[in-house]
Amino acid sequence: MKTPFRRHILATAFAAAASVTTGAHAQPALSEIKVSYQPALYWALPFFVASEKNWWAEVGLKPVFSTFPAGVPQIAAVASKSWDVGGTGSVPAVLGHVRFGIKTIGITNDESAGNALLVRKDVADKISKDPKSMKGQTILLTANSTGDYAVQSCLKKYGLSKADVTIKNMGQAEIISAVSSNNADLAGLWAPNIYTLEEKAGARVLCSGKDGGVVVPGALIARGEYAEQNPENVAKFLAVYLRAWKWMGANKTDAIAMMKKFYEQGGVSISEASMKKEFDTRPTFDLAQQLARMDRARGNSDADAWFGQIAIFMRGTGAVQTVPQPSEFITDSFMKRVQADPKLREFATRAN
């Protein structure tokens, strides 16, 4: 026999269950998606903007973020399935394909000007006048990174090779500390670390990847197994990312204010002039431009050419044993899903 208290408990439980069921129909549950990136970087800003604007929920996603100091540890983390999608440099994207079957599904930005070889201010004039004087000197850089790729393109520009210098592998924060304390003269960095060293230590950019004649794309990536099993979520992820760039392009002042907050959360403080430089020197790509850069209708795409050169560079460093074909790991199928879905396409191309 049920007591009045027992009947009350059961009635409450049934009411709660009914409420949850009704709510589930009114508001579908969000799909969790694990997003990886490196904090305080220009190409990662769209993740922050989308979260501030609550755009993930609009397409039915619930992001769970994980951050890494550089691409190599980020790629290694995929072995434990700790992330599903994200952004990274083009060098770790290639490495990720070779080791773990990671797919490149889009381009974050053109960061050719955002990866560079810097020289300490005390010797900047000397080395700028005679770049070949770098022969025999030590360059600090983060190995198997876009910074490494840019440095080696710059050495080639000056008629030097990796064998002509001593390369010391260090993290970006360690490099900044070493140059700032006059313990190193030459360094390979990516933005915004470039601006930090310029502003706080007076270092000077000697040569960027763009100066060295290479294109350094950033990569939007997905874990192969996840992408195969959840193509719609991957397309939604891309739509959110693209919308954030659209909004930032149309609302630059507000976007820079968000960038300041985002960078400070990652421990980076640079001037507004340097933040504006990020926008001015780092081209990004909307949906139509993404599809155009990955279009293979007339043979290899632009993306194939860019990543193909990076793969050749990586074989030269010993990071990979053979050069993978870009068609093996670059796919436009998820961008095409965004384009083919009227709602997602409108969402991805909206500037408000």
Image: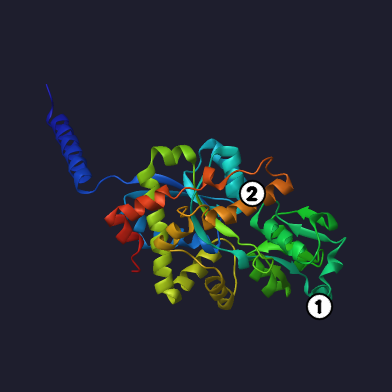
Q: Quadrant for residue 209, please give it.
A: bottom right
Looking at the image, residue 76 sits to the left or right of residue 226; the answer is right
Residue 146 at x, y = what percent?
64, 57
- Residue beneath disc 1: 125
Examine the rendered structure and indicate whether residue 32 appears above or below residue 262: above
Please name which of the two marks, 2 or 1, marks the residue nearer to the observer.
2
The amino acid type, in three-letter code, at marker 1 is Asp
Label 2 CA crowd tier, 10 Å (few <14, some 14–19, many 20+): many
* Label annotation for residue 311: 2
Considering every residue shown, the one lying at the far front of the view is 298
Q: How is the structure coloured here?
A: rainbow
Q: Quadrant for residue 96, please give it.
A: top right
Q: Secondary structure at mark 2?
A: helix
The amino acid type, in three-letter code, at marker 2 is Ala
Q: Quadrant of the C terminus?
A: bottom left
Residue 305 at x, y = what percent?
58, 55
Point 73% across, 48% down: residue: 317
Observer able to see residue 245: yes
Point 39% across, 68% down: residue: 247
Point 35% across, 64% down: residue: 349
